[in-house]
Amino acid sequence: MTGAYTNRFLVIDLSCESVDIIPVPEDLKQAYIGGKGFGAKLLSENVPPGTDPLGPDNHLMFMTGPLTGTLAPAMRGCVVTKSPLTGIFLDSYFGGSFSPEIKYAGYDGIVIKGVAKKPSYIWIDDDRVEIRDARGIWGTDTLASNRMIKAQLGDESIKIAGIGQAGENLVDFALICCEFNRQAGRGGAGAVMGSKNLKAVAIRGTRSVSVHDPERFKQACETAFQELAQSPDVAAFREVGTAGSVEFANETGLLPHKNYQNGTFSKASELGDKGQSKHLWLGSNACMGCPIHCSKIGAVRTGRYKGIVTDIVEYESAGLMGSNLDISDVRAVAHLVKLCDCYGMDSMSTGGVIGFAMEACERGMIDSPDGIEIKFGSVEAAEYLIHAIAQRREGLGTLLSRGVQSAAQKIGKKAEAIAVHTKGLETPAWGPRGVSGMGLAYMTTDRGGCHQRGFPAGYELEGEWEGKKIDPLSPEGKASMVIDLQNYSAGTDTLVKCDFGSYGISASTYAALFFAATGRQVTRKTFMETGERIWNLTRLFNIAEGMDASQDTLPRRFVEEPLPDGPAKGHRITKKDMTYMKQEYYKIRGWDTHGVPLDKTLKQLRIEYGKSS
């Protein structure tokens, strides 16, 4: 294949300070396209079962897609590694300009392994690659270290992916900050980076990205921009970003309140776009080359936190750091999220962990530390815990730094009943008790509880999927919907596209973009088959790590406690519901009753686990 691929991976071994440039195999491109596909295949081939996620043998990969760095709208990048939080496969996505810079430097991906002998950062200047001393930068937050590295290198245009103190201190849900306000947030990739004594990757590229057929590519881009312009969903994102989902989730009973005890919050409007517009926003912002402009530029203009510069408070952060903690002042939530961003810590998992701690304290399972009362509604308590977790202070800080699952296991005293996670990953801010298919999506995601591997809730609340009526509370007919959404998501995540872009851009247009960029003819079916191949590959990786069907389950709160409010009041997803959906899911996937892919399924998908496909 010619065109938009650079056909090169940059491989850096920090232990021996070696740098290699290796070709991207043609069969890898054919079977896995790019992005998530490349990462999943390379991880399965190079990280053996039982590898310590925080050990030298784990790989940390920054992967691009074939459309990255081109004029195609809404393109992103992904980090792939083995998660220290869950112990299984992890892919985490980020916007901004770091991923295009990888392509401009001449690489389809960067693979990092080993451990540096001292705190270091990697400097990539096209083909010149150096491992530099970061001892003078270690201990700084994500914003300060970004400024310091750019000052050292004498170029403000350099793109940087780095960690804060949370990553350095190996907090299991530490993130990687990929330029300002753009993070590979979920699952602890920042801790993997910290375990490698790696503070940052700085990159500058001077090459352009070519395409196979420039005129056809230009036409496909114009079609994509038109589709985005005509989409009402994209128009809503452009106007208010994901903050507009706060009141929607509240009205439908899906908004977490007090560690998911409830599904509604009486002050939700203060956290959504109305509250944010009043107290924070000054203008719109976008990732590189994206016409959606779903982000915002703003500052806290009044009150205790006046002067804090902030981005939009995304829905997930508003839900988990706001309503989930019974905090309604969006200025305070912006402050808490900014603390997480500076420390380099996933605000979603942090909100889940703090909500768990608040409920555990109120129930007498753990004690509040001296001088602070850990309780719902307390901004001071939330701020205290953020500092304690990021710095891994003795006591609660160390306990909670390992995530909800680990903390609950250590506390005992029935704490696991209030620990809201799936496979160790804290649950997103969409409670599933009113949308059973969403529950199945959480149960079966390859990286743990996640709403970005297929989001059936929207179809369930509309009551229709592919022309057929569906009952959001019923377990029937949910498996095929979830599988289709998962396959398409994984297939197009090889590009690496933005979820918001896919609300407008059609599969046929993605295929046209891909063909014009690479010369390879594909269809929607290609993306679906590639996604299915990836989904089975990551399943095999997770099984090899000890995962089994018993972990395809939901938190006890969603199974044993009926929803106390909202339109689905009184409903829960029972064990019987879970079993029904799970077995139907396994059967359609071509897996056995224990969730293991059948040989005939693997043969059909041309998968030889751990070997080149």
Image (cartoon, rainbow, N blue to C red):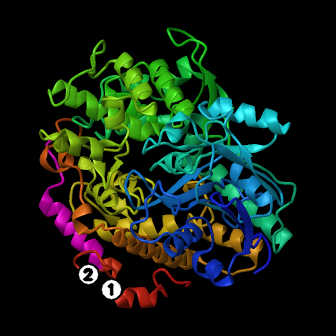
Q: Position of residue 171 (x, y in %)?
A: 44, 41
| Percent x, y of residue 283 | 67, 27
Q: Callout 2, which amino acid?
A: Asp
Tell me which corner region of the image, top left, top right, bottom left or bottom right, holds residue 369.
top left
Q: Quadrant where the C terminus lies?
A: bottom right
Which residues make up the magenta segment?
570-587
Q: Is residue 161 magenta?
A: no
Q: Which quadrant does the N terminus fall into?
A: bottom right
Please tell me whether the stretch drawn in magenta is mainly helix, strand or loop: helix
The residue lying toward the viewer, choosing from 534 and 514, is 534
> Residue 550 appears in which quarter of the rendering?
bottom left
Q: Residue at x 36, y 89 (%)?
A: 599
- Give neighbour class at mark 1: few <14, some 14-19, many 20+ (Cα, 10 Å): some
- Name the residue rendered at 32%, 51% in the picture: 424
Asked if 529 appears above or below 509 in the picture, the reply is below
In terms of secondary structure, where does tag 2 sit?
loop
Residue 598: numbered disc: 1
Q: Which mark is residue 397?
A: none
Task: Confirm or deny contact between disc 2 and disc 1 (CB under 8 A).
Answer: yes
Q: Position of residue 394 (x, y in %)?
A: 34, 29
Report crowding for label 2: few under 14, some 14 to 19, many 20 or more residues within 10 A (C-alpha).
some
Whether 574 is among the magenta residues is yes
- The kind of residue on which mark 1 rests is Leu
**Residue 127 is at least partly visible in this image:** yes
Return the residue at label 2.
592
As displayed, is residue 63 above or below residue 254? below
Identified at 61% across, 30% down, the residue is: 140
In the image: residue 247, left or right of residue 583: right
| In the depicted structure, whether residue 562 falls above or below residue 273 | below
